[in-house]
Image (tube, rainbow, N blue to C red):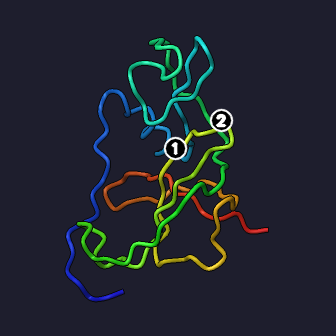
Amino acid sequence: MDNLRTPPRPLPQPDALTQPFWDAAGKGRLVVQRCGGCGYYNHPPQPLCDRCSSRDLKFQPVSGRGMVYSFTVMRQRNVAGFEGEVPYVNLLVELEEQPLLFMISWLPGGATEGLAIGQLVSVSFERTEEGMALPQFRPVVD
């Protein structure tokens, strides 16, 4: 890592809709909005179900397991707050609970060795200095 003076990494700004997600993350639990009408998982959180437009959405625990759907290695220093982190990996993770139920994660240090599309991952929580817990996915090691 270079000795670059960088701004702090941007943090999520919870609002009334997303606060339950961040509260659960703070307790080390991964939750996703689920429709009480049709059972469909919705992420990111929103006011209406993507499948049936119901407003009956509640946050429910999920396993925290999934697979790498896609990833990219970031080498440019043009993302505010991440200039000193390059290279790093952005992951698109498909959770096992439902096809196309995605979450985004990152791996610092460009840890691409052995990383592959379809690889199994599980959630962990990165604690920030500001007291937030950020869900991050790491490769499952046999």
Residue lying at 51% horizontally and 28% vertically, measured from the top left: 33
- How many marks the image carries: the answer is 2
Name the residue tied to disc 1: 27
Quadrant occupied by the N terminus:
bottom left
Identify which amino acid the numbered label 2 is placed on.
Answer: Gln
Q: Which residue is mark 2?
A: 98
Percent of width and height locating residue 56: 49, 12
Query: Disc 2 versus disc 1: distance between alpha carbons?
Result: 23 Å
In the picture shown, does residue 10 fall above or below 4? above
Q: Nearer the viewer, mark 2 or mark 1?
A: 2
Residue drawn at (48%, 23%), measured in percent from left and top?
50
Q: Is residue 40 left or right of residue 57?
A: right
In the figure, residue 62 lies in which quadrant?
top right
- For numbered disc 2, what is the local secondary structure? loop
Q: Residues within 10 Å of mark 2 (few under 14, many from 20)?
A: few
Q: Residue furthest bottom?
A: 2
Task: Specify the quadrant of the image occupied by residue 45.
Answer: top left
- 57 over 111 or under it: above or below: above
15 horizontally vs 118: left or right: left
Residue that appears at 26% across and 88% down:
3
- Residue situated in front as seen by the camera: 11 or 51: 51
- Whole-percent x and y of residue 136? 51, 57
Q: Quadrant of residue 23?
A: top left
Kind of residue at disc 1: Lys
Bin the neighbour count of mark 1 within 10 Å (Cα to Cα): few under 14, some 14-19, many 20 and up.
few
Residue at 52% of width from left, 14% of height from top? 52
